[in-house]
Image (cartoon, rainbow, N blue to C red):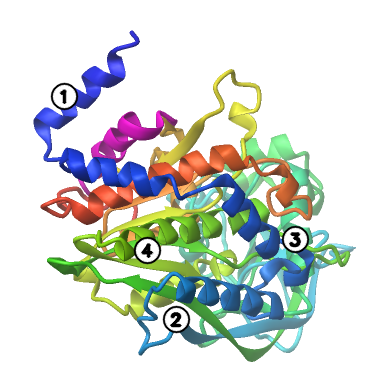
Amino acid sequence: MKNLPMIAAAMLLAVFSFPALGQQDLSLRYAGTIQAGDLDKHLTYLASDELEGRDTGEKGQKLAAAYLVDFYQKQGLTGPVGGNYLQAFELSSVRWEDLELQVGNQDLVLNEDFVFIGDADTQKRIRTELVFLGLSSDENLAKVDVEGKLVGMWAIGARSADVVGKVMEAGAEGVILVTMEGQANFDRVANRYKSLSGRGRLGFDRPTEHRPVFMVSSETMGKLFETPVEQLKEAAKNNPESIPSQKARYRVRKDKIMVGTENVLAYLEGTDKKEEVLVISSHYDHVGVNSQGEINNGADDDGSGTVSVMEIAEAFASAAKDGYRPRRSILFLNVTGEEKGLLGSEYYAENPVFPLENTVNNLNIDMVGRIDYEYQNAENQEYVYVIGSEMLSSQLKIINEYNNITYTNLILDYRYDAEDDPNRFYYRSDHYNFAKHNIPVIFFFNGVHDDYHQPSDTVDKIEFDLMEKRARLIFHTAWDLANREHRTPVDGTNTRLDR
């Protein structure tokens, strides 16, 4: 059994053209520059209170961007945006004033009992009924008249936009939605929305749609219909019309201002294949200060990915200074606005500095500094989750596995790469905006933990030795992709296009 990795490596070598031994030796030499101590130093600043949680468009995000630019300049990397390192753009910050929701005699409290996740600008109060549909199946829609009414629904494990869209097309006035199990999970989301309420919800500036969507917990949905939750779930499957409707009214008033933010880009030009570009990415924003005034430092999410990109960039820059430039060019991309809906990576993909057809791969790093629930009691905790590596290219997963076998011997865990993953992690980080353009991607991830999106996500909890090993794997894979003779083929089907 001890010889299995060597046997697997030999089989891979027999099938694929991997870098020559000299290139492998160079890869090992420069991977050694990725050090836990350096990761710690950079993260201690980026996840410090001084940066106030790096909220998109706020002072802390700007300080983080300046720190990244200064670092890349010192490495001798180029600013590819007309000679600059910042790709600036604007987002609209939307506030919904006087948001009201009443069902029966119950006045619901914003960001405690419900969260507003839709779009609307009604100005005046809208009086209607709340009817229970449960599921957006054709069978249920045939049983329940949704025309001009608020509709109570479940959307757990489904794409909420699809669920809402189908019901609105059927004539609904709006939707009250359950998207997750457990009051604690809802409360976490509600607290996050509460912390954002003073600053507004960021997004690209678009015309207002009449799509009033209110998210509640399953427990609150039961209270609205004065029906036990389990009974509602059963009715959703068979007889939603059996649940009595309720009188309802709501009001939404919308206001918006424009906010400036920036992606940070650093470029290393390649040699004989320099027109082809490998993108190594992370998001450097986080969620700022919560409603209690506590700073969400975002050490793991995604300070860990950001400093990993920095150290990988330094390794490649060191090699270039010694005369070992990669054959392909490399773009080190730290994006903003991920926490607001993958906005920075979407902006780059829609406004690429380098043509997307010349972008060969994206290696995306989002949370690689911790040990999650699944491995917290494991004997071997040297793992990383790998997502998306085999969907678009038959070779990318194998290349990553080869480099892992050769250099790092981590457990590569693919459990969250399933298309029916209820967590939908594939859709929740910046690689998605490359994959949707048929660019083969790998998303490296350590899974979630109790400190996810909490003020307790701090530097003292980071496993720096493990993060060093994960970053070295990503560097080895990047070195391989940047120097091999042929770019990875796009010979797979993109089956996960819609978020």
At a point 56% along the width and 27% down the height, the residue shown is: 381
Is mark 1 in CB contact (under 8 Å) with mark 3?
A: no
Q: Residues within 10 Å of mark 2 (few under 14, many from 20)?
A: many
- Where residue 114 appears, x then y in whole percent? 76, 61
Q: Looking at the picture, which amino acid does disc 4 mark?
A: Ala
Closer to the camera in the image, 271 or 80: 271
Q: Looking at the picture, which amino acid does disc 2 mark?
A: Tyr
Disc 1 and disc 4: Cα gap in Å?
Answer: 32 Å
Indicate which disc, 2 or 1, sits on the residue closer to the N terminus. 1
Disc 4 and disc 2: Cα gap in Å?
Answer: 16 Å
Query: Residue 85's mark?
Result: 2
Judged by depth in the image, the label closer to the viewer, 3 or 4, is 4
At a point 28% along the width and 46% down the height, the residue shown is: 26
Q: Residues within 10 Å of mark 1 (few under 14, many from 20)?
A: few
Q: Looking at the picture, which amino acid does disc 3 mark?
A: Asn
The residue wearing badge 4 is 317
Residue 356 in view: yes
Q: Is residue 399 magenta?
A: yes
- Where residue 297 appears, x then y in whole percent? 73, 60
Is mark 3 in CB contact (under 8 Å) with mark 4?
A: no
Highlighted range, magenta: 393-411
Q: Secondary structure at mark 2?
A: loop
Indicate which disc, 2 or 3, sits on the residue closer to the N terminus. 2
